[in-house]
Image (cartoon, rainbow, N blue to C red):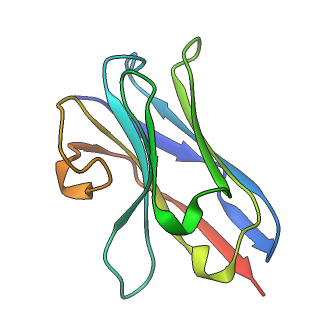
Amino acid sequence: QVQIEESGGGSVQSGGSLRLSCAASEPTYRRYCMGWFRQAPGKEREGVAVIDRDGRTTYEDSVKGRFTISQDNAKDDLHLQMNSLKPEDTAMYYCAARNRRVSEPLNPNDYSYWGQGTQVTVSS
């Protein structure tokens, strides 16, 4: 079973940037589809950005042009560069992995392996 750990969360002002990182206990490059998800208080968990085993990326509409997901194939790390952050981006951010193809890559229900999350807080 893949163990996942996130890092890089914190507090920033609106318009600022943060870079989240995700490390797994076994090689994930081209073996697992990896994604970032977030959950704000009182809201359901939602997909933010996903990268498939072939490198194809999918983004949630509200983060397109601001967030970039990337995978370091040498270190097997996953990153989420978040620019132009807004207060509505405030949430607990989770890294997750799946090893099967799905029709909706941003659906969190299709992911089997999850980290504990890292908090991102954006103040206005």
Task: Look at 45% across and 78% down and name the residue there.
Answer: 40
Q: Can I make out residue 2 in this image?
A: yes
| Residue 14, image x, y percentages | 79, 77
- Depth check: 29 or 84 in front? 84
Numbered marks: total: 0
- Position of residue 43 in the picture relative to residue 80 (left or right): left
Quarter of the rendering containing residue 124: bottom right
Quarter of the rendering containing residue 113: top left
Quarter of the rendering containing residue 72: top right
| Residue 123, image x, y percentages | 75, 83
- Position of residue 29 in the picture relative to residue 71 (left or right): left
Q: Can I make out residue 92 in this image?
A: no
- Position of residue 47 in the picture relative to residue 13 (left or right): left
Say above or below: 122 vs 71.
below
Task: Look at 37% across and 18% down and name the residue there.
Answer: 26
Q: Residue furthest top?
A: 74
| Residue 77, image x, y percentages | 55, 27
Say above or below: 117 vs 11.
above
Task: Look at 43% across and 84% down and name the residue there.
Answer: 41
- Position of residue 109 in the picture relative to residue 64 (left or right): left
Say above or below: 37 vs 102.
below
Task: Look at 54% across and 15% down and name the residue there.
Answer: 73
